[in-house]
Every structure is written in structure tokens, then in C-alpha cells.
Amino acid sequence: MFLKALAFVLGSRSAERGQMLLMAVFAMTVVFVMGVIMVDIGIWLTERRGASKDADASSLAGVQAYLSDLTDTSGAFNDAVIWATLNGVDPAEIDAAPTLSCTAGYSCIGVGTSNCREDGTDNMPWVEAKVRHEGAQLFSSIFSVLAPDIGAAARACVGSPRSLLNLSPFGIQTSFVPPVGDPETGAQCLNDEDDDGDGEINDGCPLSDCLEPVPGDPTRTRPIYGAVCIMKTSDSDNVSGQFGQLTIGEGACDSTLDSSGLKHDFHYGTVALCTIDDEVNTGTGSIVGLLQGLNARLEEEWLCNQLYFTGNPDNDDFDEVFNIVGGAPGVPVVPSPDAIFAENDCQITSVHDDHEHTYMPRALTLILIDQLEKSAKTATITGFAGFYVIGCFDGDTSFQVKAEIEQDLTNFDSYLNRCKKPTGKQDVLGIFVKEVAAPIFVGDPDPNLPLAIVLVK
């Protein structure tokens, strides 16, 4: 009897060990299957990010056709398709006609000249790219898991920026010197002579050397994109102590600040939201506070240089700060009157007085105003423009430095500086750039405002 009982006990324990072994094998199999499927899921997520990047680039490349013709849907479609193929999408797997209802297994491009936003309340032309990537498999096919079709969609539109935050409080005058008889034009506006002999120097010329008449509409001006601009801050050029500094502050756009507030806002950017046609207060007196704020801002540059280093070990070079939207691979990122730029992902975050500010040290957004007047304390906002800072230079030599830099805009790194020890006798040199705009602040294209590209989804 004892031997039978012992045999029963031993047999039970052996059976338990067998069951545990089977359970362990089953568990290990489940873990292995989950692991190999997770590897494929990681690959699919990478493909999803690639599809999203291709969709963004294709829509942004296509929408640029609207910058010269707001009705050019065929050009927008063709350019988007070309860019998609440059990024590896098989042209045979892209629908040949504009559509947002892709053929099964295909990518597709849609275009339109109104209703960019989903609520249909706008008249902005748009391009939407739906890009498909086939999901690759390493292991999941072993277990009869089907590879998914991985896709992403992006829509880009063209409109005019209406409101902006994080502005640099300096105004560029967009008006003209009133003409006396026939206005001086072109190169006549670049000297200090009375070229037309009417007794007035540079009459009919833009108030700022940074702007030019709009082609086809000589009553308006626009920033001269891709050329070196001189922000006049030196004592030799002002209107009753005004140099273009604007006092915006933390509240409404028409609030006022003292010199320390001006320094803060040029360092970190303004908090208040400013909109086209808002009245903004102009500052008077010394410009040194503003330049000190710019110096403090430039002293914080490092991240773009670290992440996108292209040769200058000390400064955020132009091509470290910007990339060209829709630019072909290998095209150099240099100042241009036509290219649309986007900021690289290297903004810094700084905390000051319990406020968190995020910005790119060398990339400013300047305010365009009607003009500075001797007796006026305010100016009207007419627009906004992106601006890359080169540095500060003596006011007596700034025009000479401007000419030297413009001789080779592909290599001006040696001129970059951080406005150290600023004085009231210096000017700021930089370059206006066309930038992708924030989607919430862009409205319908306005013939009196610059056009901007915006990515809405």
C-alpha cells in the first residue's frame, strides 16, 4: 500500500512538472510571437513617419505654384507629383488626375482654389497629398499577419498672415516718400542725389531700403527677399528720436513699455497678439536697450549649430537655421528672393520671470508699419516678415558691409556676430526670408499683403 501511494505521489508531481513545462513553452512562444510582431510594428511606424514626411513635402512643393498664380491648379498638381516621385513614391502608383479618393493601393494628390480649411470658410488655394507606403515585413508574415498599407495625408495652403505672436518689436516702414512730379525709381532710390532735378532727394522712393515697389502695382511695397537689409538704428537716421523700435509688451498690441521692457521683448519676443491694421506705439530715445536684447538673444544660439552643423563652429549659419520647403535634394540652402523657408527643429526654450519662451535666436519676425512720423506716437501695422540676423555694424560702414556680403550670399559666415557691446551708432544687418506661416493666423490671400504658405494638416 505504501509503495502504491508513493508511486501516486511521484506520478502526480511528474505530471505537474510536465504541465508546467508545456505552459512555459506556450508562454515563451507567445512572448516570441509578440516580440517579432513588435519589430514589424516598429518598422510600420517608421514607414508611417516616412509617409507623413513625404506627404508634407509633396503638398508644400506643389502649393508653391500658387505663389505666382493663385489659380494654377495644374502646376500645383504636377509639382506635387514630381516631388512625391523624387522622394521614392512610384509614379505608376500615383493617380494621374487630381483626386482625394485614391485608387486602392495608390497615392493621390488633390488641388483646389478655395476652401482650404475643413469648415469651408476661406478662399485659400490648396494642395493635399495622400501618400501610401507599403508596410514591409520581417517576421509577422510567418504568422499570417498581413502587411498593412501605411499612408499619411497633408494639406498646404496659400494665404496672407493676419496676426502673429512672438514678434520682434522693430518696425520697417512700408510707405513712400511723397513724389514731387515724376518719382525717382530703381537705382535712383539707392543714392542721396536729386536724380530727377525736382528739388527733392529720392522722392517717390520707399521709406526703407529694405523694401521695393510691388511689380505691377507701384503704389505698394514689399520686403526685398534674399537681399541684405539694414535696420537703421544708428544716430544718423531717425525721425525725432524714433528708430523703428515699437513698444508692445505683454498685454494688447497697443500697450507701452519702458526701455527695459523693450530689451526683454527683443530678447524673447513679444507676448501680445498683433494683427494687420492694429495701431502700435512707437518708441523714442536710445536704441541701445533693443540692441542689448538682441545681443542677449544671439548669445543663446547653439542648438542649430549642434544639430545641423555646416562649417561655422560659433554661430547658427543660415542653412543651419532654415531648410527650403519643397527644395530638391542637394539644393544649397542660401538666401533667395523666391524660395520658401521653414525653420529647422532647433528652437531653444528659455524661462524668464516664470514665463517660458521658445524661439530661434537668429530668426526674427519683424513688423511692417506704414511709417514713422515726427509728431505721431503710433503707427499702423501693414504686415509681418521673417528676418535672419547677420549682426551689428557701425552705422558709417553698414552700407559698405552690405555690399560686401551681397557679393557672395553663399558664404557670409565670417560676418556673423552677436552685437556685443552695442552702442547707439550701430545698425543691424540681416536678410528677409519668406517663411511657412503658422496655420491659425493665416487668412485669404490679400493683394496688399505678402503671401505665405501654411501647412494645415
Image (tube, rainbow, N blue to C red):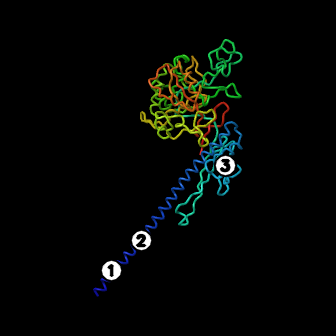
Above or below 410: residue 372:
above
Q: Quick one: SS at disc 2?
A: helix
What's under tag 3, amino acid-wise?
Ile
**Amino acid type, callout 2:** Met
* Nearer to me, 429 or 68: 429
Q: Secondary structure at mark 3?
A: strand
Nearest the camera: 206 or 394?
A: 394
Quarter of the figure with residue 6 = bottom left
Distance between mark 1 and mark 2 Cα atoms? 20 Å
Q: Is residue 168 left or right of residue 175?
A: left
Q: Label 3 crowding class (10 Å Cα cut-off): few <14, some 14-19, many 20+?
A: many
Q: Earlier in the sequence, mark 1 or mark 2?
A: 1
124 w.r.t. 409: above or below: below
Q: Dot 1 corresponds to which residue?
A: 10
Q: Nearer the viewer, residue 188 or 72?
A: 188
Residue 258, position as x, y percentages in the image: 46, 24
Q: Residue 134 got which mark?
A: none
Q: Earlier in the sequence, mark 3 or mark 2?
A: 2
Residue denoted by label 3: 109
- Separation of disc 3 and disc 1 at Cα? 72 Å
Q: Which residue is mark 2?
A: 23
Number of marks present in the image shown: 3
